[in-house]
Amino acid sequence: MRPLFYAHSGLRYLVLLMGLIAVAYFAFGLATKRPVDKSVRIIGSSFAGLLDTQVLLGVILLGAGWPFYPALWGHIVMMVAAAVLAHVMLVMNRKRPNPGYLLPLIGVGGALLLILGGIMAIGRSPFATTSLGG
């Protein structure tokens, strides 16, 4: 179970990095009024895919018998909310006749805030490595 914990713990850095890249790209596109191309979809989907993988690893950890403690409720709720927000905003943008940068920016930016809150809900720092334990 340790490798799974380390994978779940380490993947957060990729999720956060991809989220920051996406927010920067979407904000730049919005500010400069650049035309939207398929890179918006690729970057948004990359973030959502990494986030989905992170949520899946967390669910597998819990299913494999990782110790559950009350603070995990806040973590779980905020992480699922982050994934839902990102997906909903990205899908809404994709279905628009003229996709833009605003909805993906709201989706990824809001998801990042929820992720940071979810990490802090279990008493951890988003950028600190912790030992095994609950």
Image: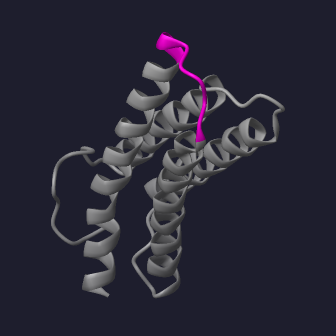
Considering depth in this image, is 33 or 64 the residue closer to the camera?
A: 33
* Membership of 57 in magenta stretch: no
In the image, residue 100 lies at what x, y percent? Answer: 66, 26
Q: How many marks?
A: 0
Q: Residue at x 53, y 74 (%)?
A: 59
Q: Which residues are magenta?
A: 30-37
Would residue 33 be counted in the magenta stretch?
yes
Residue 62 vertical position relative to residue 16 in the rendered view, above or below: below
Relative to 79, does residue 68 appear above or below in the rendering? below
Name the foreground residue: 79 vs 43. Answer: 43
Q: Please tell me which residue is depicted at 40% across the width and 79% down the height of the picture.
A: 66
User: What coloring was used for the rendering?
Assistant: one colour
The quadrant of the rendering that contains the C terminus is bottom left
Q: Residue at x 52, y 61 (%)?
A: 49
Please tell me in which quadrant of the rendered image residue 71 appears. bottom left
Residue 81, horizontal then vertical, whole percent = 62, 46
Quadrant (top left/top right/bottom left/bottom right) for the N terminus:
bottom left
Task: Look at the magenta stretch and give its main secondary structure.
Answer: loop
Q: Is 103 displayed left or right of 92 in the figure?
A: left
Left or right relative to 77: residue 94: right
- Report x, y in % for residue 16: 34, 46
Q: Which of the 4 image quadrants contains residue 8? A: bottom left
Residue at image x 61%, y 44%?
86
From the viewer's perspective, tell me whether residue 87 is left or right of residue 114: right
Q: Tell me where residue 57 appears, x and y as whole percent.
A: 45, 74
